[in-house]
Image (spheres, rainbow, N blue to C red):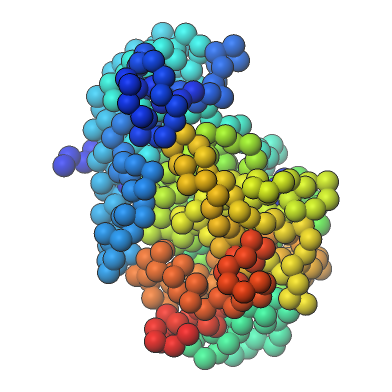
Amino acid sequence: MKQSKLPVILGAILLFSSFIVSSQQSQWGGKVQTEIENVWVDSAYDPADGTQSVVVWFKDQYLENADSYLKKTKEFKGRKRLELRSEVTSTLKEISNMAFGKVESKLKAMEQSGVLTNINQHWIISGFSCNVAPEGIAALKKLENVAFIFKKQPSIVPKGNNMGPEYLESIPVSNFNPKEVESYPWNIEKIRAPEVWDEFGITGKGVLNVVHDSGFKLDIPPLASNIYTNKGEIPGNGIDDDGNGYIDDYHGFHFDQGKANLNEPNIRRATNIHGNLCAAMIVGTYETGTKKAIGVAPGANWAPLIGVNHIEDAIEWAIEQGADTYSMSFSHPNLGEYRTHWRKILEQGTLCGVVFISGAGNFAAGNSFAPIPVQMRNPEDIPNAVLGVAGIGEDGQRPAFSSQGPVEWNTAYYREGLVNKPDFTTINYKVPCVDPEGKLLNMASGNSLAGPHTAGIVSLMLSANPDLLPWEIKSILLSIAEDIGDPGFDYQSGHGFINAYDAVNAVINPKSK
């Protein structure tokens, strides 16, 4: 069994069965069935499929009910983000440790018997993941305090066989200086980032952006100088120096592989490296060999992460490393009830002070067309805790592919019905993007680019005021969004187009729009 990573606390582009209770309505809003046991099992789980990966929730959760997130945001009004992060994280870990400790010996016995493998405790939700043989599911359901069992979905992120170097031997000093900028591509001008650098002297300094993606090359000039370094880890020594469960996680981690492998030479041969172009959109300094500024927040830092099938580990890592924004330019269809697991994780992660951002998806036209209300998929369909962002081109028009809302939430747990999405609009069409050497030789389109532009804007806002709460950031963006579609909210552009200057100005001068 994997060793718990938690301290003992006494006293939280596009890549491609109902809760059973006795004669009472389920708190999840699911159908009432004859009482057999108080454990809900995902209908996607089928014992005939053999050993499967599942995630188990304990009854005791920080956010106890479907409406608890919004209640917490009201309760935390006026709090400072970084102080709240420490408080909520500690409480999440305490709840998880207490629940897990009660069943740990039984889990070890089940592991020894061979019905469970790869047991991994989580704290971002109170629970654990494991692989379970069909004969083991009944034993899982009998464990103390177990409430819900979800079938986990396989990762769609490439595992990246034949990975490249895991870390940079030396980090170059950033040479970015707003006064030396000679030019910038149209998207950076349209997002009004240079006005923020020039007028307010804010470039994103002090902000850490996680880029959860694949396709990275860490050593290109626009990205190497602001790559994150985990000071508790000695790179390349094969030792978990900081004791967090991950060896050599100096810049980030590949959670699907369970290694620090991040450079991907196979993907590097393509003209676009997806993770790189997203990272450069957020924090890129200069195009290689030029003084052309290419990122919205070139003074900020970034950390690459890979591995969507281990979203719990990835977000826990990000929180403990001090991440401020979390960019997810991927989109998962057909997750069924597993969407609930993602949503709870991201709600609790948001309460830890992370701003989660996802492009709206590219499923409104062409071979990838999907009908409404599933054009926007997971995680961009998550309300409140995820900023789902659509985009426009240089001409201000929405491309036909850009996914539309509304989305629908009728899982067994979250049952709001139709929910307004997307939230905002930035840029997504024919955008100059870095190639494998850091040159702007590519043009790319897709809402994979809309999310990173938003992450850059949020980075500048947090650089201006690090203690802004995630929901305060959303409120500010609502106040400055420019209506570009039908009057008011619409399902193509959300609340409207957001830009960096108006957002930062609203942070610095709160009375002005």
Location of the N terminus (image quadrant): top left
Q: Nearer the viewer, residue 350 or 270?
A: 350
Q: Quadrant of residue 113?
A: top left
For the point 39% across and 15% down, the residue is: 34
Residue 27 x/y as whole percent: 35, 34
Residue at image coords 55%, 57%: 420
Residue 452 in view (yes/no): no
Q: Is residue 187 left or right of residue 18?
A: right
Say whether residue 336 is left or right of residue 469: right
Give the image location of residue 445, x and y in percent: 77, 62
Q: Looking at the image, can residue 501 be seen?
A: yes
Q: Is residue 475 left or right of residue 47?
A: left
136 shown above or below 303: above
User: Compared with residue 97, is residue 343 higher up or lower down, i.e. above or below?
Assistant: below
Left or right? Give the position of 394 relative to 219: right
Asked whether 95 or 487 is in front, the reply is: 487
Total tally of numbered discs in the picture? 0
Task: Give the answer, above or below, for where 501 lies relative to 129.
Answer: below
- Name, please, the residue furthest toward the left: 11
Residues 299 and 450: in front is 450
**For the point 44% across and 15% down, which residue is it?**
137
The image quadrant of residue 109 is: top left
Query: Which residue is painted at 60% across and 60% down in the image?
Result: 422
The percent position of residue 153, horizontal first and vertical second, equals 58, 32
Residue 418 point in image, percent of width and height: 55, 49
